[in-house]
Image (cartoon, rainbow, N blue to C red):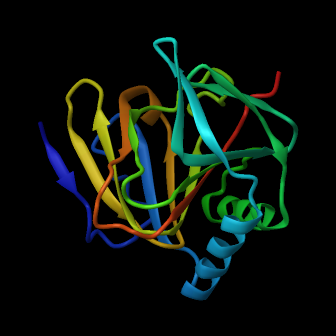
Amino acid sequence: MIKMDLFSTGSDESTNLLPKDGIVNYYGKVFSLREADHYLECLLNTIEWKNDEAVIFGKHIITKRKVAWYGDQDYEYTYSNTTKKALPWTKELLELKSVTEHRTGETFNSCLLNLYHNGNEGMAWHSDGEKNLKLNGAIGSLTFGGERKFSFKHKQSKETVSLILEHGSLLVIKGLCQTYWLHRLPPTKRITKPRVNLTFRTIACP
């Protein structure tokens, strides 16, 4: 197993952080501290947060982590055997969508948001391969709040790549990444601040 920790790589957005089979670009902080603090406060207080739910092996699970789903239309998004219907964009989400599209050159029609109240809440290894997502489409991921380690693991070779997602930063996942790589947000006792993560996506319209 090859392990790479990219905690001091800078923020050269043209660099692919993965050694093969996919593309991950880290843009670093794309918002000033003042802007990032502003959006964190807005998102914490204006988003319709709900505890996430999942049905795993027939068991209904409710997580401490909260989620919200927004989009151009009332798109349905199904994962972990549960379905969400998209809410209409808020003013702040449209602003953040515009910044993300401008910086990446991609276009998005939906956003899945996650609220982690502290470092005890995380996300296990998974890939975003839901059928209604655009095949090999880009995901633009913004982080506000607590800075957390984020990791990728190749499904065959088990190589891992990790980096720290900073407050006000942008990460883009695209190409074959979802096919060949898993990703996760490991829990940590060192982080006590909340983190809001926005993942801008493209639903493939019928």
Instruction: Name the residue at 20% across, 28% down.
Output: 157
Q: In this rendered view, identify the residue nearer to me: 61 or 205.
A: 61
Q: Is residue 75 visible?
A: yes
Q: In this rendered view, identify the residue nearer to me: 190 or 199.
A: 190
Residue 106 percent across, percent down from the top left: 67, 51
Looking at the picture, does residue 92 appear above or below residue 199?
below
> Where, quadrant-wise, is the N terminus in this rendering?
top left
Residue 74 percent across, percent down from the top left: 86, 36
| 27 to the left or right of 72 | left
Instruction: Name the residue at 16% across, 47% down.
Output: 3
Looking at the picture, does residue 128 appear above or below residue 46?
above
For residue 76, which quarter of the picture?
top right
Residue 116 percent across, percent down from the top left: 50, 56
Q: Residue furthest bottom?
A: 34
Instruction: Name the residue at 66% across, 66% down.
Output: 44
Instruction: Name the residue at 72% across, 47% down.
Output: 108
Looking at the picture, does residue 9 appear above or below residue 50?
below
Residue 174 percent across, percent down from the top left: 51, 42
> Where, quadrant-wise, is the C terminus in this rendering?
top right
Q: Is residue 200 visible?
A: no
Looking at the picture, does residue 103 appear above or below residue 122?
below
Marker count (numbered): 0
Q: In this rendered view, identify the residue nearer to me: 74 or 116.
A: 116
For residue 60, which quarter of the picture?
top right
Q: Residue furthest top?
A: 58
